[in-house]
Image (tube, rainbow, N blue to C red):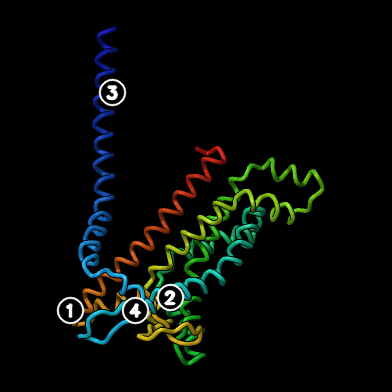
Amino acid sequence: MITWNLAHYRRRKFVNAVMLTLCGIAALLAVAPLMWILAYVIQEGGRFLSVQFFVETPTPVGVPGGGVANAIVGSAIVVGVACALSIPIALIAAIYAAEHPNTPLGVILRFSTDVLSGVPSIVMGIFAYTVIVIPQKQFSAFSGGFALAIIMLPIVLRTTEEMLKLVPRSLREGSLALGASEWKTMLQVTLPAAINGVVTGIMLGIARVAGEAAPMIFTAFGNPFFSTALDEPIATLPHMVYVYAISPYKDWHAKAWTTALVLVVLVLGLNIIARVVTAWQLKRMGWR
């Protein structure tokens, strides 16, 4: 009997080691493409990285130097417009979905959000082109922000909803027992308790839309000059990568890699910050 138990234990230990090894190999295979892309972008784009690249505007073909200062500012403006349009709506809708999850409107809201999050970004760009660019008869930074806001909306909404559900129900019940109204409880008790998670969702949404190039082709369109007007075409980092990459000029190809490096570092940094804040929030609430 003892011999059988020992053999069974050794077999289980061997199978466990084999499965853990396979899981580790699968994890490495999943991470390898990201590491490869990062290494290649750093190798190609890091060679031309300089301070001037961040503070100067693009130069004509064949002229050395130049940078993407207009695209950096333009991306910040377009993403800022997207945040201003999507965050208030997402927060209010998330509060309703968290408080009334089983009502017909709550069910429809979650279903619609899931469907919206799966729509390709280029479709969002075509939609913004139809409802804003065509009536205005010109491309604009606002239309780009509008397209990104639609993409950002379901991300912030669902993340905020899940974070509100993580708040202990005893906090809400205690507030209601003390005589506070339902809306005041949500705004002054539940939402502040989940504020770190809400901020994380917002950062994830920003990281998601900051690298979108397809909607910008139909909306912001790009601008070789420095512009901050909302009703005019504006340069963005993803669109500039696209324009530089498809050009037949070698110096523009080099600028495309450097611009891609700046964009990748920006998006990766936002994702890392969001993950760190999420982990800290879950640990603080006792879920880890």
* Distance from Cα at disc 3 to Cα at disc 4: 63 Å
* Distance from Cα at disc 1 to Cα at disc 4: 19 Å
Please name which of the two marks, 3 or 1, marks the residue nearer to the observer. Answer: 1
Q: Which residue is mark 1?
A: 250
Label 4: element kind: loop
Q: Nearer the viewer, residue 179 or 66?
A: 66
Please name which of the two marks, 1 or 2, marks the residue nearer to the observer. Answer: 2
Please name which of the two marks, 1 or 4, marks the residue nearer to the observer. Answer: 4
Answer with left or right where residue 40 lies relative to residue 123.
left
Q: Are marks 1 and 4 in contact (CB under 8 Å)?
A: no
- Quarter of the image with the N terminus is top left
Q: Which residue is mark 2?
A: 73
Q: Name which quarter of the figure residue 123 lies in.
A: bottom left
Where in the figure is residue 227, as x and y percent of width and height? 44, 84
Q: Amino acid at mark 2?
A: Val
Q: Name which quarter of the figure residue 5 lies in.
A: top left
| Label annotation for residue 56 | 4
- Mark closer to the chain start, 1 or 2: 2
- Mark closer to the chain start, 2 or 3: 3
- Classify 10 Å Cα crowding around label 2: few (below 14), some (14-19), many (20 and above): some
The residue shown at (82%, 48%) is: 179
Q: Which residue is mark 3?
A: 12
Q: Nearer the viewer, residue 242 or 127?
A: 242
- Mark closer to the chain start, 2 or 4: 4
- Classify 10 Å Cα crowding around label 3: few (below 14), some (14-19), many (20 and above): few
Q: Amino acid at mark 1?
A: Lys
Label 1: element kind: helix
* Distance from Cα at disc 2 to Cα at disc 3: 58 Å
Answer with left or right where residue 218 lies relative to residue 14.
right
Please name which of the two marks, 2 or 3, marks the residue nearer to the observer. Answer: 2
